[in-house]
Amino acid sequence: MSPETSLQVKPSFLQAHWQKLLAALFWLVAIILYVVYTQTQNLSPLASLRQLIGFLSESMLGPLIFIALYIVRPLFLFSAGLLSIASGVLFGPFWGVVYTVIGSNLGASLAYLIGRFFGDGLINLKESEQGLGKYLKRLRENSFETVFIMRLIFLPYDLVNYLAGFLKVNYAAFILATALGSLPGTISFALFGASTGFSEGSPKFDWRVLLASVIIFALSLVISRLVKRKEQRA
């Protein structure tokens, strides 16, 4: 065998990552179709929420459909906060929280896997640590604490999911931090939804439930500050 034939030709970027590019294309087309549909139907996020509440309130499979929608929600970048509010409107403060926790964590897992798929082979973690500095290093070495604080201070939900997968953050640490760190916000938004009368067409606030929502929301911010200070001291 000649030296020329024994040499391995390095594949081009297109040859090495055509699956990712094709998947990204389909994903982009799906988002464009979703945006075009909402624009042509004059559906704002709030109008979409009202339609969703109306549809699910009349369906016997409402909880299952709601969870399924929450799982695929990251693909269309629909607001997680609005869906959490809808859960309180539809299912009340208790079951609204339960269904949102299930759907949001499954959806976060899906986004994490998508991020990991697109990040595989595209980024050298050791080299990127030198370029991105302490932030990337902290996210990988202190995954639970970092993701937990990100959830408590309400950084963009989907951005954290995709970034964690793209950077190959430990999944167990990621999902545990997501479940615990998102819980105060989930309860807060669900209670807010339960305190309103959106399903009846006009807001009718239950101030006791609304007050509980505000307190929990503020408490999550306080906890995030305490955790951050403790980590800095350590």
Image (cartoon, rainbow, N blue to C red):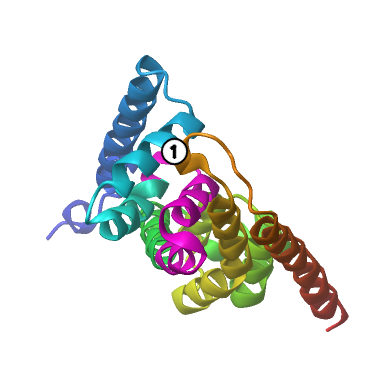
Q: Can residue 170 be seen in this view?
A: yes
Looking at the magenta stretch, what is its main secondary structure? helix
According to the picture, the residue beneath numbered tag 1 turns out to be: 49
Q: Position of residue 181 (x, y in %)?
A: 61, 70
Q: Position of residue 78 (x, y in %)?
A: 45, 41
Q: Quadrant of the N terminus?
A: bottom left
Which quadrant of the structure image shows residue 231?
Answer: bottom right
Q: Is residue 38 left or right of residue 18?
A: right
User: Residue at position x 54%, y 51% from top?
Assistant: 193
Q: What element carries label 1?
A: helix
Q: Where is residue 140 in the image (x, y as percent from the top left)?
A: 59, 71
Q: Is residue 48 left or right of residue 85?
A: left
Q: 78 and 196: which one is in front?
A: 196
Residue ranking furthest to the bottom: 234
Q: Is residue 78 visible?
A: no
Vertical comparison of 102 with 197: above or below: below
Q: Is residue 108 left or right of residue 13?
A: right
Which quadrant of the structure image shows residue 34?
Answer: top left
Q: Is residue 124 left or right of residue 226?
A: left
Residue 81 is one of the magenta-drawn residues: yes
Residue 169 is one of the magenta-drawn residues: no
User: Residue at position x 26%, y 49% from top?
Assistant: 9
Q: Quadrant of the C terminus?
A: bottom right
What type is the residue that disc 1 sits on?
Leu
Q: Position of residue 233 (x, y in %)?
A: 87, 80
Q: 229 and 92: which one is in front?
A: 92
User: Residue at position x 52%, y 50% from top?
Assistant: 85
User: Residue at position x 60%, y 43% from top?
Assistant: 204
